[in-house]
Image: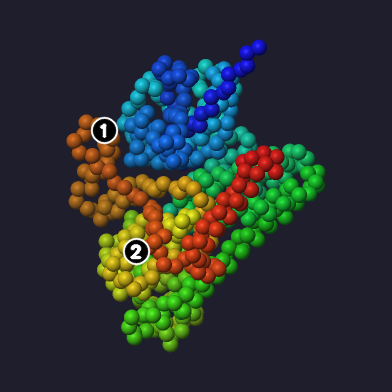
Amino acid sequence: MASAKPLKKRVVVSNFIFRFTGEQERATAQVALFHRSDAVSTYPGHYAPISGSMDRSQDPSPLHTAWREIREETSLTECSLMLFRRGREFTFTDEAIGREWTIFPFAFLLRSQGAEESIRLDWEHTTWKWFDVADVVNRAQDGIGDDIFVPRLAESLRRVYPEGDAAFGTCAPKLGRALWQLREDHKSGARELASIALKLFRDLLSDALPAPEGDARREWWDKVKMMAWHIWRNGRESMGASILSALLPVLAQLETLVLTPPLTTPIKSDEMLAVVDSSLEERTSIIRRVCDSLASFVGKDVLPYRNDDRKTLRILTLSSSSTIREGILHLVSTLSPGDVDVIDLRILESRPLFEGVSLSAALSRALTESKNQSKIRLNITIYSDASAALAAQGIDIILIGADRIASDGAVSNKVGSLPAVLSAKHVAPQCRTVVVSELGKIAEPGESPGVEESTPLEVSNTWRADAVSGVEHLETMMKRQNISDETVAINVRNTYFEWVPAELIDVYICEQGINTVDDIRQRSEWVATQIDRVFHSSGSGSTV
């Protein structure tokens, strides 16, 4: 008897392009699906997302594959699309065609209405159209042989759009709203957003309680972990390290409560919620320890080495990090007037949302309303972003926060951080570049998030508010940016974060004091171990 042919294994990406029609709460999610031509080797004549195999020789990550396939098969680029969601990968077998597929689902969101007009199909597809997500999930069959959609289309779609996943039950809509809230929050820093994420998880956990008894508890716990996974991966990716650090210890403690006792033993819901509440309270003590570490560093390693005799400490910073804000207020209240009479604080305004202005107002308000009048004077000067080199003249330290710290010590922070650091290194070579951050912002090794882009309207709206000449024409051209027969193309980039390499950073200050790059690397490896234990361990009955 002839043996069966071995299965061909393929790692592929499935890229769903989303748009939302209607108004906010009532908005309908629609997904673009593409009709596969007779020229493709698998599933001709079926509707599918933009898909393709991962090529290890040119694709360092599944996300890289996803962007490559979208460009090749639709001509859309980052100017038209933004990454919206990631889904957990999964594997299935199609015996009929002798394939084992490992699918990495992604969802992308159109940046503007009408951007789909620039879609140009290649030979793999004949046409495409919009489908309501709910209809696709209801109609697509998870089995093999559906005559409309490619196999497991609903499975892939639910993984990037959990609000349409019946497995989450009544929690599904609230989970979707939580992800949108995190995604659209452009005012909170990473530390604040992590606390918000933890509170949102608490709300979801509260709705999911009580925990069932018996074997159903393992499945229930996997659902709870998957909600946490989505909050981490699909809330605000650029701040995912901080969100993850808030979730991991809570999940570890909850898992002990859920799975250590016999599965038939009832679990008190209040006891589980108390775990989250305790973690929220502990987060306030972390920032106090970070501030103490900063004050200690300034007192021992900065003040004794200033280049002049004047009792002035000169600091340059930007954006509106709550960690930086609390750190500066702590310096004002704890430094000795015998060493410092004035803190000369220069703040870059941080366009387009002018977070530096907000930081200046918050510092001024906190000090003027304080009952404990400091003997140290805080002089604040706001500079335009383009004045970074002028603002850096003669500074002692440049203080930046961190939304994410990579395993090699590179720091992702508000765009403008790198020019500010480079300017300071050139015009004030004696200054120290100081990163102030909790350990929780150190990310696991591996792929770092791409550049986070927000709507160009945040930029152009400031032009319109100031009645800048020609803004109406520019906005018209921006809407026509992907039309191929235009002789002029205008794009506006609104990048939120950028990376400052480790070689430009002198000191990392956290709740445990001063850290080195080796310390960061070790912490990053520890985070990876915790991710594997919490989200990939089979000890709970299945992996998440």
In terms of image quadrants, where is residue 343?
bottom left
Q: Is residue 421 left or right of residue 224?
A: left
Residue placed most toward the observer, 1 or 406: 1
Is residue 209 among the parts visible in the rendering?
Answer: yes
Asked if 279 appears above or below 9 in the picture, the reply is below
Residue that extends furthest to the top in the rendered view of this protein: 1
Quadrant in the picture for the N terminus: top right
Label 2 vs 1, first from the N-terminus: 2
Q: In the image, residue 367 lies at what x, y percent?
A: 44, 75
Quadrant in the picture for the C terminus: top right
In terms of image quadrants, where is residue 360?
bottom left
Residue plotted at (32% across, 67% down)? 425
Residue placed most toward the observer, 58 or 367: 58
Which color scheme did the rendering employ for the protein? rainbow
Q: In the image, residue 93 lies at what x, y percent?
A: 58, 25
Quickly name the residue at label 2: 421
Residue placed most toward the observer, 540 or 369: 540
The number of numbered discs placed on residues in the rendered structure image is 2
Q: In the image, residue 491 lies at what x, y percent?
A: 27, 43
Please state which amino acid type lies under the numbered disc 2.
Answer: Val
Question: Label 2 crowding class (10 Å Cα cut-off): few <14, some 14-19, many 20+?
Answer: many
Quickly name the residue at label 1: 483
Question: Label 1 crowding class (10 Å Cα cut-off): few <14, some 14-19, many 20+?
Answer: some
Please state which amino acid type lies under the numbered disc 1.
Answer: Ile
Q: CA distance from mark 2 to mark 1?
A: 38 Å
Residue plotted at (36% across, 46% down)? 455
Is residue 163 among the parts visible in the rendering?
Answer: no
Residue plotted at (64% across, 54% down)? 250
Mark 2 element type: helix
Which label sits in the foreground, 2 or 1? 2
